[in-house]
Image (tube, grey):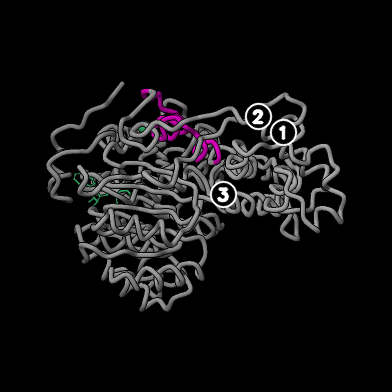
Amino acid sequence: MLQTASPDVLAALQDTFGFSGFRGVQEHVVARVLNGQSTSAVMPTGAGKSLTYQLPAVMLRGTCVVISPLIALMHDQLRSATANGIRAATLTSADTDRMATIDAFRAGELDLLYIAPERASQPHFRELLSSAPVSLFAIDEAHCVSEWGHDFRPDYRLLRPLLDAFPDVPRLALTATADRHTRADILAQLGIPEDGLIVAGFDRPNIRYAIRPRDNALRQLKGILEENPGPGIIYAPTRAKVEQLAASLGATGRRVLPYHAGLDSAVRARNQAAFVASEDMVMVATVAFGMGIDKPDVRFVAHAGIPKSIEGYYQETGRAGRDGDPAAAIMLWGADDFARARQRVGEVEEHRRASERQRLDALAALVETAQCRRAILLRHFGEDPPETCGNCDNCLEPAEVTDATELARKLLSAVYRTGQSFGLGYLEKVLSGQSDERVQQRGHDSLSVFGIVGASEAPLLKPVARALQARGCLVPTEHGGLALGGTAREILKGEAAVQIVVPPKREGRRKQRGSG
Ligand code: ADP
Ligand code: ZN
């Protein structure tokens, strides 16, 4: 049953925030919380999660204790709450006025108290709570409690005993991204009933999604900048890459600034402020950039390499077009991105590898698909969207798909027969029957795979190799060669098929601009 808000709730909304109404599921969430019912709200970034605990915090007697993972996030929230006249404080190692905060908390003079999970789970905080009026527990970034989530934090697991010690205080778990597994886990881990799950719609219809293989990142990014004159963010995987791209793209005359955690905090703050104020600037950044930044008119978000997961992709692209006007999300991906990511999976704790691998498989399916990108995204978040959206690359320019199973088998078998140590360039030579000194010396010109790929098929070897690498069926060796991995054997045995999107021909790919 959808709950609606009473007139005094609407009056408080107006008085405290100056808003004339709720947005989407906010009303439902607030009504439940005011009713004392524990709730888990999954709402995309920008949907207005903070209000769902801040408004009850103002209306209910006592203090709403907010668990938040990062001091920077807490201070952002503190600033905006205080600006709305809400009595709020943080309890962190960075605060020098902790005693005053504790006194105010005990005296019932705080609406909001922000605290990190590791501090909240300590025994003396539990004692403090016993001596102070608590109205609500708000658990921000609640996906951190789940090992299925993309950002598991063991400290979140320690919260449960604290929550259980105050059974009369309702709990509100908040997150922007949670797939089905993670959602169920949040409910179970935090002791929230199943009917307390509220999920807001995830669709961002004004964002146009496009995902392309990366052939020349700089040239492609320059093209993206030309097509998108408004403010934009380019996410790059490393600090070095950020610096390098910012310098090269800045040379085009466009205003471009870098942002990453290695920069001096004053420089970061200055660059961020310049970006927020600008109408055409491009920020080249690591994923450190974006959280808590209020810039509704970002017109494009580009990824120079793959994001960490579909959740990450959704969150990062979600920073585009928050004003509702058309915006673009363009990802450039390479087989090496997946190779690196899969290598990192091998380095995480054993019990987490399966879910990390699934995350990469889901991402690989999104980048490789010829189907509607939005449909895949929304299905990932548990929705049941239409088959096509009309506003993604695959819907706008349907891609040609071809069955490349045979060619994939030829490639995999060449990898196997040459000893799993050569790179794609060499394998292409062997497969297409180009003999040279190296090939002859190794006797590879007498292998059964020598020359079995004809001239018409040869151009598809690269996209096939890319698809196989994305799936983990081909993995890089230490010395830059390729070896078999994942489900390669099933493909070799003819038990699994490989479909690929045929790459468009370079010339005449885009005939826009001027020609009508
Ligand atoms: P989230 O935490 O879900 O990303 P925020 O809580 O930061 O979102 O809210 C995003 C923006 O939406 C903020 O600028 C906030 O002031 C605004 N907002 C939230 N709720 C409403 C509302 N009911 N009416 C108008 N604006 C709102
Ligand atoms: Zn689509």
- Residue 254: x and y in percent read 28, 68
Compared with 377, 51 (above or below) is: below
**Disc on res. 409:** 1
Q: Nearer the viewer, residue 419 or 106?
A: 419
* Front position in the image: 160 or 26: 26
Q: Sequence-wise, which precedes: disc 2 or disc 3?
A: 3
Tag 2–tag 1 contact (CB < 8 Å): yes
Residue 378 counted in the magenta span? yes
Q: Looking at this view, is 89 or 290 the one in front?
A: 290
Where residue 283 sits, quadrant-wise, is bottom left
Q: Which three-letter amino acid code belongs to the residue tagged 1?
A: Arg
Q: Give the secondary structure at mark 1.
A: helix
Residue range (magenta)? 364-386
Which quadrant holds the N terminus?
A: top left
Residue at x-position 58% and y-position 42%: 459
Residue 105: x, y in percent? 35, 59
On the question of residue 392 being in view, the answer is: yes
Confirm whether residue 197 shows in the render: no
Residue matched to label 3: 152
Q: Nearer the viewer, residue 306 or 295?
A: 306
Quadrant placement of the C terminus: top left
Q: Where is residue 72 in the image (x, y as percent from the top left)?
A: 40, 64
Q: In this view, does 389 lie to the left or right of 333?
A: left
Name the residue type under label 2.
Thr
Question: Disc 3 vs disc 1: which is toward the camera?
Answer: 1
Q: Residue at x 71, y 58 (%)?
A: 480
Other residues around mark 3 within 10 Å, as few (<14) / some (14–19) / many (≥20):
some
Question: Depth-wise, is mark 2 or mark 3 nearer the camera?
Answer: 2
Q: Is residue 148 magenta?
A: no
Residue 405 is marked as: 2
Give SS at disc 3. loop
Residue 451 position in % (x across, y down): 74, 40
